[in-house]
Image: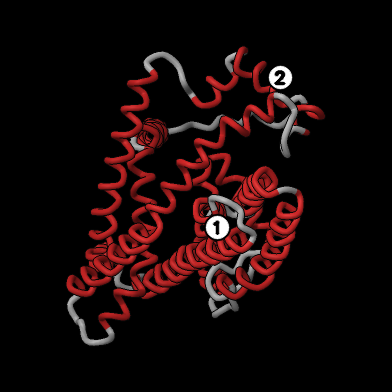
Amino acid sequence: MAPERIVHFRPRTILAIIGIVVAVGIVLWVVWIARHVLTWVVISLFLAMALNPLVGFLQSHGIKRRGAAAGIAYAAALAAIAGIAAAFIPTLVDQVNNFANKVPDYVHDLTHGRGRLGFLETRYHVVEKVRNAVESGGVRRLIGIGGGAALTVTKSVLTAIAAVVTIVFMTFFMMLEGPGLMDRIYGLLPERLQPRWRAVGHDIYRTVGGYVQGNLFISLIAGVSSGLVLFVLDVPYAVALGLVVALLDLIPLAGATLAAIVVVLVALAAQGLTAAIIVAVFFIVYQQVENHLLQPVVYGRTVQLSPLVVLIAVLVGAEVAGVLGALGAIPVAGAIQVIIVDWQRQRRGRPVAETTL
């Protein structure tokens, strides 16, 4: 029988472990308390990365000062947003109001099993299922309505205003001070390690920035093309529905499908079966073009991830942080891939080709 082995831990080791556990707990607690602010930081970071190439372009074409280039780029972005808003918001508001006024008619036809959406009640008894969910409090639990609804709504509005203002200013300051801040961070490292981590940081910036710019560009194409199709088919609320498509298309994998379902149902209710079929065919064809042409071209030189890794990353991100997690999952996975490639290169002691996970 082997002699019993006793392992002794020094008090310093035990205290160090306890200290690490306590520190991790405090960090997680702070992250949870400040999760909304951290969300604003992430959004500002993505927007700053999307605008930074314009700042670099201005600096390389005569405007040497970082502050002046960042100010011009930011002003140009705000002017573009204001111009788009001035052109489309009146139409958008008018169409949303018309749609809201038309909703009671759709609901009346649905509850009585009439109209183009009447089959939802006659075949699937949607109204009874919704009524049961409301009576059981399911909808209230789903959307989080409880006591003090007015206070909750007011708080949400004020939080949204604070978020917009904070993101606007934080994005500008990130554009203005981002390179200097990164230089100070790299300066904390030993001098022999700085070139390596500067290269890693540059690759991560290229990956995340390319994804953000590509995602915005592809969503713009989706919104404009779908809006044009709806306009040609004389489907009402074409501008509003195009905006819905553009916003939902930002969500990886599932966003375009959700947008297609919404738009097809509106086309069916407003114009009939023929228009709904044409819209459905358009979305099927567009999804193939986006998946096999636009995304490979836009993402091919930046976020080089396999479809399996993208799917896993999006599912994990959505489970952890909802829609924002799904949006940030792909650039985070791309950044992790950059770090893994660098670790492989350092471990083998020689350059390795960047692999796709």
Residue depicted at 31% across the width and 27% down the height: 154
Going from the N terminus, do you reach mark 2 or mark 1 first? 2
Residue at the spot of label 2: 128
In whole angstroms, how far apart are the C-alphas of marks 2 and 1? 40 Å
Callout 1 environment at 10 Å: few (<14), some (14 to 19), or many (20+)? many
Q: Is residue 102 left or right of residue 64?
A: right
Q: Quadrant of residue 64?
A: bottom left
Looking at this rendering, what residue extends furthest in the bottom direction? Answer: 61
Callout 2 environment at 10 Å: few (<14), some (14 to 19), or many (20+)? few
Regarding mark 2 in the picture, which secondary structure is present there? helix
Residue 203 in percent (x, y) is at 45, 71
| Tally of marks | 2
Residue at the spot of label 1: 330
Foreground residue among 329 and 220:
220
Q: Is residue 73 left or right of residue 96?
A: left
Residue depicted at 59% across the width and 61% down the height: 226
Looking at the rendered structure, which numbered label has been put on residue 127?
none
Q: Name the amino acid, label 1.
A: Ile
Residue 295 in percent (x, y) is at 61, 68
Q: Is residue 268 left or right of residue 60?
A: right
Residue depicted at 60% across the width and 19% down the height: 138
Q: Name the amino acid, label 2.
A: Glu
Regarding mark 1 in the picture, which secondary structure is present there? helix
Asked whether the viewer can see residue 188, the reply is no
Foreground residue among 19 and 140:
140
